[in-house]
């Protein structure tokens, strides 16, 4: 990897880790996650003011960065590139959240082009909505059951049992960084499988 510009010692070390990660070195991914997890998390927390949202946004940021790591070029420090991805993702999240709050009458366009309306007056589901929700949960569980055992366990603990990352780490006796790194991979696999399932319906 050809270095362009004057980098600090830490930024230069990052380049070595990125080069290894681009070749599939899992330890390098974990090292990059460990180096920047807290700083990305606190940046997200400042933006969204909610620890759970900040946690999820941190995982999403690393997920997007790691998925695009082949596109990274050392014109600037890895940390600059990572924080740009994290900030953009967070801004998108905030924008979508505001749309959900302010556009209840006009509805929200979903990814498949349909319009989803939100009933602000009631938190209870009518029978047809309850059935649809149950069908979605069942479809999700069916897809989750096809994941590799370690990813399936992570998804079940996080989203079905609603455990925190720390609780999952304690439950599985794994380092917190490992749980977060594997969970973003599990979510990526799950997202792809759900997309495939949607196309086959």
Image: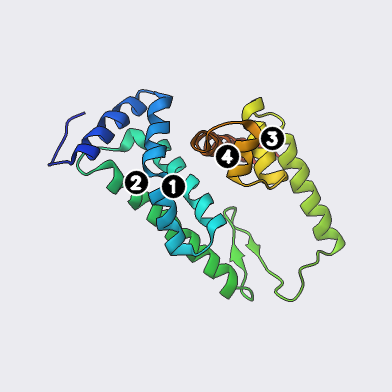
How would you rate the neighbour count of disc 4 (Cα within 10 Å): few for under 14, some for 14-19, many for 20 or more?
A: some
- Of residues 110 and 19, the one nearer the viewer is 19
Cα separation between marks 1 and 3: 22 Å
Q: Earlier in the sequence, mark 2 or mark 4?
A: 2
Q: Are marks 2 and 3 in contact (CB under 8 Å)?
A: no
Query: What kind of element bears circle 4?
Result: helix
Quarter that holds the C terminus: top right
Q: Nearer the viewer, mark 1 or mark 3?
A: 1
Mark with earlier residue (3, 4): 3
Q: Earlier in the sequence, mark 2 or mark 3?
A: 2
Q: CA distance from mark 4 to mark 1?
A: 13 Å
Tag 3 or tag 1, which sits nearer the N-term?
1
Q: Quadrant of residue 46?
A: bottom left
Q: Is residue 185 left or right of residue 73?
A: right
Check disc 2 and report the residue beneath it.
Answer: 82
**Mark 1 and mark 4 in contact (Cβ < 8 Å)?**
no
Tell me the residue that label 1 is attached to. 61
Q: Is residue 80 left or right of residue 61?
A: left
Mark linked to residue 187: 4
- Coordinates of residue 27 in the picture (x, y in percent): 41, 26
**How far from the left and from the top, in percent, is residue 143?**
69, 35
Quadrant housing residue 14? top left
> Splitting the image into 4 quarters, where does residue 187 fall?
top right
Residue at the disc numbered 3? 144
Q: Secondary structure at mark 1?
A: helix
- Specify whether residue 196 is in view: no
Check contact, mark 2 vs mark 1: CB within 8 A: yes
Of the numbered discs 2 and 1, the one sitting upstream in the chain is 1
Q: Reading the chain from its start, which is encountered first: label 4 or label 1?
A: 1
Residue 186 visible in the shown view = yes
């Amino acid at each position: 990897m050809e270095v362009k510009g004057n980098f600090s010692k830490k930024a230069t070390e990052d380049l070595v880790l990125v080069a290894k990660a681009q070749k599939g070195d899992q330890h390098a991914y974990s090292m990059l996650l460990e180096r920047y997890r807290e700083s990305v998390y606190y940046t997200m927390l400042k933006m969204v003011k909610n620890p759970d949202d900040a946690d999820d946004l941190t995982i999403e940021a690393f997920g997007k960065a790691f998925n695009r790591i082949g596109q990274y070029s050392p014109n600037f420090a890895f940390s600059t590139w990572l924080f740009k991805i994290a900030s953009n993702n967070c801004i998108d999240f905030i924008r979508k959240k505001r749309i959900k709050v302010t556009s209840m009458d006009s509805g929200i366009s979903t990814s498949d082009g349909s319009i989803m309306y939100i009933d602000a007056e009631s938190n209870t589901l009518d029978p047809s909505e309850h059935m649809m929700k149950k069908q979605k949960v069942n479809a999700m569980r069916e897809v989750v059951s096809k994941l590799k055992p370690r990813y399936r366990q992570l998804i079940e603990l996080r989203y079905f049992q609603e455990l925190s990352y720390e609780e999952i780490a304690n439950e599985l006796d794994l380092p917190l960084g490992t749980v977060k790194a594997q969970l973003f991979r599990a979510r990526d696999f799950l997202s792809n499988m759900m997309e495939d399932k949607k196309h086959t319906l």
